[in-house]
């Protein structure tokens, strides 16, 4: 049984998926709060023949947990997360979690993302301030103070272990199980006046792209060699008949 052809084709399918993730990462290298997408591959062993054959799996995608670069803006309406946690916003179909803490205050005093999604507190309620009462201050625990009065707190949430995350727009994620509110701010906290950039390393992604191209060429050469060998075998059998 000829196994080189199906093995090479499985490798090409896996490499195509990796190429898609690299392209998506590079396109969002400057997106605030973006978490890079990685792919985990496994070998699938076939024992249909006399000898086991290893095929490349299609791959499972997951989001990198590395923090992006923190940039100090001095803008009181910018905030970033220190540690492994997310802000919560009200999406069209429920809570969405993001590392993009750029916000604005609308004419009614609602605290929103720059795309107009309400920012939530730890209980899932929207935040409200007085749009005419001056600047706000945000403490490490998310507490919002305006004119010396505490008026609410930005919620921080942790993703539950093993949760599958679905992307929402560019920087948002939606877990398949409820996120966990953070009440202990020893390891995590809010940084006012900072914005977290994408955690994509463009140089690393380009180097991966070069390695991917070489691997794809090798797999393609193996496919062509396998096809030529099969053609030659068919011709030889035809000449013997």
Image (tube, rainbow, N blue to C red):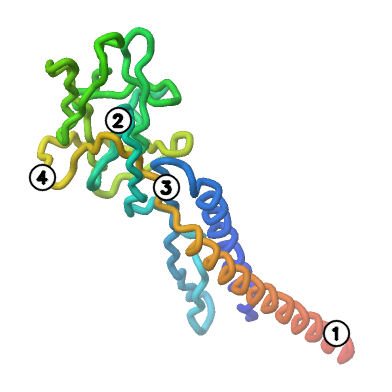
Who comes first in sequence, dot 2 or dot 3?
Answer: 2
Say few, some or many: other residues with alpha carbon within 10 Å of mark 3 (under 14 / 14 to 19 / 20 or more). many
- Spatial CA span between label 2 and label 4: 19 Å
Q: Nearer the viewer, mark 1 or mark 4?
A: 4
Vertically, is 82 above or below 87? below
Who comes first in sequence, dot 2 or dot 4?
Answer: 2
- Spatial CA span between label 1 and label 3: 56 Å
Residue 89's tag is: none
Instruction: Name the one closer to the observer, 107 or 94.
Output: 107
- Spatial CA span between label 2 and label 3: 18 Å
Disc 4 element: loop
Vertically, is 69 above or below 177? below
Who comes first in sequence, dot 1 or dot 4?
Answer: 4
- Spatial CA span between label 1 and label 4: 73 Å
Residue displayed at 16% across by 26% down: 143
Residue on which the image places disc 3:
198
Residue on which the image places disc 4:
186
Residue on which the image places disc 2:
88
Residue displayed at 37% across by 36% down: 100
Q: Nearer the viewer, mark 2 or mark 1?
A: 2
Residue displayed at 22% across by 34% down: 156
- Which residue is most to the bottom? 240
Disc 1 element: helix
Of the 4 image quadrants, the one containing the C terminus is bottom right
Who comes first in sequence, dot 2 or dot 1?
Answer: 2
The location of residue 154, given as percent across then percent down, is: 22, 27
The location of residue 74, given as percent across then percent down, is: 31, 35
Asked whether the beta carbons under mark 4 and mark 3 sit within 8 Å of each other, the answer is no
Q: Nearer the viewer, mark 2 or mark 3?
A: 3
Q: Nearer the viewer, mark 1 or mark 3?
A: 3
Q: Quadrant of residue 168?
A: top left
Is 13 on the left or on the right of 173, as rendered? Answer: right
């Amino acid at each position: 049984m000829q196994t080189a052809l199906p093995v090479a084709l499985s490798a090409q399918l896996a490499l195509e998926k990796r190429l898609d993730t690299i392209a998506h990462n590079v396109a969002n290298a400057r997106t605030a709060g973006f978490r890079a997408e990685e792919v985990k591959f496994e070998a699938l062993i076939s024992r249909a023949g006399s000898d086991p054959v290893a095929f490349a799996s299609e791959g499972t995608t997951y989001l990198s947990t590395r923090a992006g670069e923190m940039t100090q803006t001095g803008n009181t309406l910018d905030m970033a997360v220190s540690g492994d946690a997310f802000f919560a916003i009200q999406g069209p179909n429920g809570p969405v979690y993001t590392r993009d803490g750029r916000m604005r205050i609308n004419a009614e005093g609602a605290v929103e993302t720059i795309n107009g999604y309400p920012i939530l507190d730890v209980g899932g309620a929207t935040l409200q301030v007085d749009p005419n009462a001056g600047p706000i201050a945000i403490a490490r625990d998310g507490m919002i103070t305006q004119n010396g009065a505490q008026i609410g707190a930005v919620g921080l949430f942790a993703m539950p272990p093993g949760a599958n995350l679905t992307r929402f727009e560019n920087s948002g994620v939606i877990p398949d199980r409820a996120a966990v509110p953070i009440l202990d701010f020893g390891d995590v906290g809010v940084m006012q006046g900072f914005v977290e950039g994408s955690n994509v390393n463009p140089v690393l992604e380009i180097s991966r792209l070069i390695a991917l191209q070489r691997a794809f060429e090798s797999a393609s050469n193996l496919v062509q060699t396998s096809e030529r060998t099969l053609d030659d075998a068919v011709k030889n059998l035809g000449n013997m008949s």
